[in-house]
Amino acid sequence: MEEKKALVIFEVSEKIGQLKLRSADGKFYSTDCVNTKNMFRIVQLA
């Protein structure tokens, strides 16, 4: 079970990228982002 959980976490981390997006205070912060196709894959893995 732990191996499967580790594999899922690794696969999810490969599909998520980080973009610097502007926050309400005007500063840019790295934010996790994913496209629609990969979001559906993440949901399927969960």
Image (cartoon, rainbow, N blue to C red):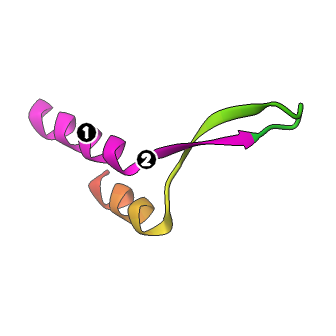
**What amino acid type should be assigned to the residue bearing mark 2?**
Ile
Q: Is residue 32 left or right of residue 13?
A: right
Magenta span covers which residues?
A: 1-21
Q: Is residue 4 left or right of residue 24?
A: left
Label 1 amino acid? Phe
Task: Judge from the rendering whether residue 2 lies leftward or rightward of residue 26; answer left or right.
Answer: left
Numbered circle sitting on residue 34: none
Look at 10% across and 34% down and name the residue there. Answer: 3
Q: Is residue 41 above or below residue 7?
A: below
Q: Is residue 10 magenta?
A: yes
Displayed quadrant of residue 2: top left
Residue indicated by mark 1: 10
Element type at marker 2? loop
Q: Residue furthest right?
A: 25
State the residue at coordinates (49%, 62%).
Answer: 35
The percent coordinates of residue 23 (x first, y second) are: 80, 37
Instruction: Report crowding for label 2: few under 14, some 14 to 19, many 20 or more residues within 10 A (C-alpha).
Output: some
Residue indicated by mark 2: 16
Disc 1 residue crowd, few under 14, some 14–19, many 20+, Cα 10 Å: few
Q: Name the one closer to the observer, 19 or 24.
A: 19
- Find residue 40 and report its horizontal and vertical position in percent: 40, 65
Q: What separation in Å lies between label 1 and label 2 (alpha carbons)? A: 10 Å
Nearer to me, 11 or 44: 11
Quadrant of the drawing holding the N terminus:
top left
Residue at screen point 17% across, 40% down: 7
Seen from this angle, which residue lies furthest bottom?
A: 37
Q: Which type of secondary structure does the marked residue at label 1 adopt?
A: helix
